[in-house]
Image: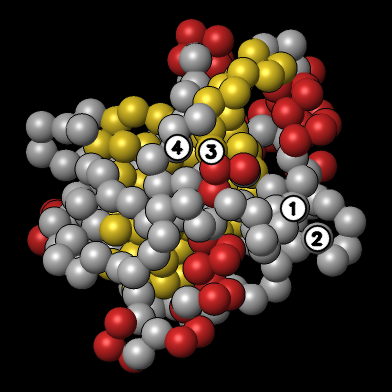
Amino acid sequence: MGIRAAQFVAAWLVWTAGAEDGGGWSLPAGSSFEDEGTCSIDVLDGSELSHQQFLERYAFSRPVILRGLTDNTRFRLRCSRSSLLQNYGSLTVRLSTANTHSYRKVDVLFREYVDEWLRPQSQDALGSETLYFFGDNNFTEWQNLFDQYEAPPYGLPDSTGAYSFGIAGPGTGVPFHWHGPGYSEVIYGRKRWFLYPPDREPHFHPNRTTLSWVTETYPYLPKEEAPLECTIRPGEVLYFPDRWWHATLNLDTSVFISTFLG
C-alpha cells in the first residue's frame, strides 16, 4: 500500500471510529432499522480514484461511493446533538414533507424539532404527514457550521457546490425524485440509497414514503427492475449523476449534508 493510500485508510478509520458514539443522536434500542440491504454500487477508497478517473468513469454515467475522500472530523464534532443545540437551538428552521414534491413547509425552533419532532417514522404514515429538516437552510445563520465542512474535491466542469444540511429520524427519507448531480455524506447514522438511471423511471406513489415502498414494493420487484442500492455510513460519500432517480431511507437518526453541483 502506498503512502497516500495508507493516509486515506487511516483517516477513514479514525473518522468512522469517532462516529460510533452517535454524537448523542442515538435513540433507544429497537428504534433503528437493521436491514442495510445489498450494495450494488462501486465503493472505492479515495486514493484509488483521481479526479480525471472520476470524470471518465462516473461523473456522467453512474453513481459511486468514496471512502476517506475528505477528513470532516471537525465538522462531525460541531454536528453532535449538544453542540448543535447550544449553537443553533434558538434558530427557526423550516421542515418539509417527505413526499416527492415537498409541498408543505412548517417553521419551528430547531430545539423544538430535535426534542419533539425527531422520532422514528411509522410505516403507515403518508409522505404528506411526515415532516423533517433537510434543505431550506438559512445560509447566513448556519454559515459558521458550513465553514467547517470539507466538501468532496472532485467537481464537474463549470459547476459550483451548494450545501443542503439535514437531520432526520429512523424510517424517514425522501421518495423517488431527480435533480442535478451531487454528493451526499452521512455525518452520523446510516442512510440507505436506491437509484435508477434517467431512462428507468421507478414505480412509486408520490405521497407514499420510502419506508412503505421498501416494505410493500421493493421485495416483489423483478430482478430486471431492481435499483442500484447501497447503505452509506459516516466517512463515506455517495456521488449521484445528473437526473438519476433516487430515494433514501434513514436507518438511524441521521445527520447528513449534500453538495449539489450546479
Cα separation between marks 2 and 1: 7 Å
Count of marks placed on residues: 4
Indicate the position of residue 23 as horizontal and vertical percent values. 76, 43
Quadrant assignment, res 235 = bottom right
Q: Using residue 70 as the reference point, say whether residue 159 is left or right of it.
A: left
Cα separation between marks 4 and 1: 19 Å
Name the residue: 62% across, 18% down: 107
| Circle nearer the N terminus (2, 3) | 2
Asked whether the residues under the numbered discs 4 and 3 touch, taking CB atoms below 8 Å apart as contact, a structural biologist would say: yes
Residue ID for mark 4:
102
**Disc 4 packing (10 Å; few <14; some 14–19; many ≥20):** some
**Disc 2 packing (10 Å; few <14; some 14–19; many ≥20):** some
Indicate the position of residue 237 as horizontal and vertical percent values. 43, 53
Name the residue: 77% across, 22% down: 111
The residue lying toward the viewer, choosing from 41 and 96, is 96
Residue ID for mark 1:
120
As drawn, the residue found furthest toward the right would be: 28
Point out the image quarter for the N terminus: bottom left
Cα separation between marks 1 and 3: 15 Å
Indicate the amino acid at tag 2.
Answer: Ser
246 above or below 155?
below
Q: Is residue 65 visible?
A: no
Q: Using residue 2 as the reference point, say whether residue 118 is left or right of it.
A: right
